[in-house]
Image: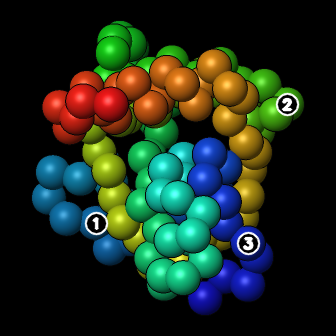
Amino acid sequence: MVSKEIRQNEIWLVNYEPSRKGELGKTARPSIVVQNNEGCVLLDTITVIPTSTKIEQYDEIYIYLKPTKQNGLNKPSAAICSHLYTISKNNFIKKIGTLNQQEIETITRAITLHLDIDV
């Protein structure tokens, strides 16, 4: 298990192997921690949203992330808010960065839209 503290709204490089048919693929990719901090401490798994550099159209579910020093991304990426994954802490490789407040709000809206949750 990763001994580093994993926190909500951080971006981590996460290993998605083994993957199954219809999933994003077997590569390690930057992923956004969406689980609350208490769960991050107490549980052996973490819920994340993966990112991809291969998305060419952005909308209310595929959220554009511009690379910044704060978020640590090195290419324009999309947060794929329709793909929530719960991953073992063992699959977390390293922290890349943290979302800014605008990115947090946009991704939160996308998750609530995707799950049809009223907040």
Name the spot of residue 22 as percent of width and height, x first.
Answer: 15, 51
Q: State which tag comes first along the sequence, 3 or 1.
A: 3
Residue type, mark 1 in image: Ser
Q: State which tag comes first along the sequence, 2 or 1.
A: 1
Name the spot of residue 89 as percent of width and height, x first.
Answer: 54, 78
Which element is circle 3 on?
loop
Name the spot of residue 57 as percent of width and height, x first.
Answer: 35, 11
In the rendered structure, find residue 19 and report the number of the disc placed on it.
1
Q: State which tag comes first along the sequence, 3 or 2.
A: 3
Between 8 and 23, the one lying in front of the other is 8
Which element is circle 2 on?
loop
Mark 3 and mark 1: span between their CA atoms?
25 Å
Placement of the N terminus among the 4 image quadrants = bottom right
Quarter of the image for residue 108 reads top left
Of badges 2 and 1, nearer the viewer stands 2
Question: What residue is disc 3 on?
Answer: 5
